[in-house]
Image: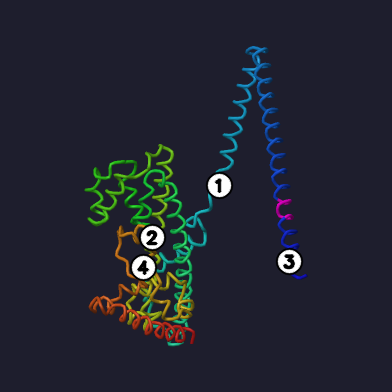
């Protein structure tokens, strides 16, 4: 009695599935019939409209033209309104301009020699000057961090503007200022080989060969006069950012030996100023562990560099500290070990300088 029960159950399930499939096929057939009816109705309405237009003669042609012109005008207005508003530029910030003027006055000022002064007055004056110098350095590091972000944003904007002309260049030259120098030379020239002599002043021979090969097979097009003007404006603004960044870094570098003597003794004032500008200050740098200090300033990898078309020397897990004399002075097969050792000692030196500065 059990076996027939299961057979009956199987038969019932099979019949249910077949019924469901039949229902689906009937539903699809009904949908196809409805689609055919809608298509026929649309075709008939189109034929009726054409017949009415032929009966009216040329009367509706003018109306259609007027409608088209109005639509074109609305499209132009929409296109003009769709353009994103220009964002405020960092160099126009009043706080940055005031800070640059303070730095200039500090560099131009000389110690006064108005005669002998008392010990108490001298100590008070030195403390005030130290406090002012510390505030200037802290503000300089904050502005350097803001400048770094502004340079990245301007670089992305410049890549977007020059992408229609040479889309492969942004993958071959990832460094912002090197990319800007190449654009200043290439401009609207489609044949890269015609400007190779000028490119020798800013690029290496391997970079020029790679760019020439990419330029011969590029999918870009010449820029219009308006597009090229926007590209040149972005290049000029990037030059201003570079000059401002260089001035702030020079000021911080000149004060680093007094402000962070242990860090400068280990890696040098130039590397120390780069590390501070990348983090925003000595307090922020002291919070970073040694394993991450060696990654500050690391150049990112792109699809072109991974494919063997790198135009810059890249070392994995290395940044600004790779240019330190303690790292470059050892054989190449020991540099990664030296980098880790320097990063560990740097973490201790930065924390010691921060504690002494706070005290």
Q: CA distance from mark 4 to mark 3?
A: 90 Å
Left or right of 132 in this view: 266: left
Left or right of 359 in this view: 242: left
Of callouts 4 and 1, the N-terminal one: 1
Q: Position of residue 297 (x, y in %)?
A: 39, 69
Foreground tag (2 vs 3): 3
Q: Secondary structure at mark 1?
A: loop
Q: Secondary structure at mark 3?
A: helix
Q: CA distance from mark 1 to mark 3?
A: 70 Å
Foreground tag (1 vs 2): 2
Left or right of 108 in this view: 210: left
Of callouts 1 and 2, the N-terminal one: 1
Q: Secondary structure at mark 4?
A: helix
Which residue is depicted at the point 60% across and 26% down? 68
Q: Which residue bears the numbered disc 1? A: 84
Q: Quadrant of residue 205?
A: bottom left
Q: Is residue 320 magenta?
A: no
Q: CA distance from mark 2 to mark 4?
A: 31 Å
Q: Which residues are magenta?
A: 15-20
Q: Which residue bears the numbered disc 2? A: 302
Q: Which residue bears the numbered disc 4? A: 250
Q: Nearer the viewer, residue 228 or 260?
A: 228
Q: For the N terminus, give its image quadrant.
A: bottom right
Q: CA distance from mark 2 to mark 3?
A: 64 Å
Q: CA distance from mark 1 to mark 2?
A: 28 Å
Image marks 1 and 2: residues in contact by CB distance under 8 Å = no
Residue 17, which numbered label? none
Left or right of 36 in this view: 338: left
Of callouts 2 and 3, the N-terminal one: 3
């Amino acid at each position: 009695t059990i076996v027939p029960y299961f057979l009956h159950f199987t038969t019932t399930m099979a019949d249910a599935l077949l019924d469901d499939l039949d229902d689906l096929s009937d539903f699809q057939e009904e949908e196809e019939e409805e689609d055919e009816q809608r298509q026929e109705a649309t075709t008939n309405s189109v034929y009726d409209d054409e017949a009415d237009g032929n009966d009216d003669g040329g009367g509706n042609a003018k109306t259609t033209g007027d409608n088209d012109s109005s639509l074109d005008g609305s499209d132009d207005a929409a296109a003009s309104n769709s353009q994103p508003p220009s964002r405020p530029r960092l160099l126009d910030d009043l706080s940055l301009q005031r800070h640059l003027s303070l730095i200039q006055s500090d560099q131009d000022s000389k110690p006064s020699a108005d005669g002998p002064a008392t010990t108490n007055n001298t100590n008070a004056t030195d403390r005030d000057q130290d406090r002012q110098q510390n505030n200037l350095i802290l503000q300089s590091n904050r502005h350097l961090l803001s400048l770094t972000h502004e340079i990245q944003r301007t670089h992305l904007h410049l890549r977007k503007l020059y992408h229609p002309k040479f889309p492969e260049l942004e993958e071959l030259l990832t460094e912002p200022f090197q990319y800007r120098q190449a654009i200043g030379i290439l401009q609207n020239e489609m044949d890269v080989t015609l400007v190779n002599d000028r490119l020798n002043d800013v690029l290496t021979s391997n970079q020029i060969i790679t760019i020439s090969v990419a330029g011969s097979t590029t999918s870009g097009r010449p820029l219009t006069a308006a597009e090229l003007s926007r590209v040149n404006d972005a290049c000029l603004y990037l030059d201003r950012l570079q000059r401002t960044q260089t001035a702030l870094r020079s000021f911080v570098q000149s004060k680093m030996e007094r402000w962070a003597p242990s860090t400068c003794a280990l890696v040098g004032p130039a590397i120390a100023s780069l590390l501070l500008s990348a983090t925003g200050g000595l307090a922020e740098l002291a919070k970073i562990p040694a394993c991450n200090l060696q990654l500050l300033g690391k150049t990112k990898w792109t699809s072109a560099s991974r494919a063997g078309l790198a135009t810059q020397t890249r070392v994995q897990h290395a940044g600004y500290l790779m240019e330190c004399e303690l790292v470059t002075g050892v054989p190449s097969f020991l540099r990664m070990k030296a980098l880790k050792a320097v990063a560990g000692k740097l973490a201790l030196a930065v924390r010691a300088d921060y504690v002494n500065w706070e005290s």
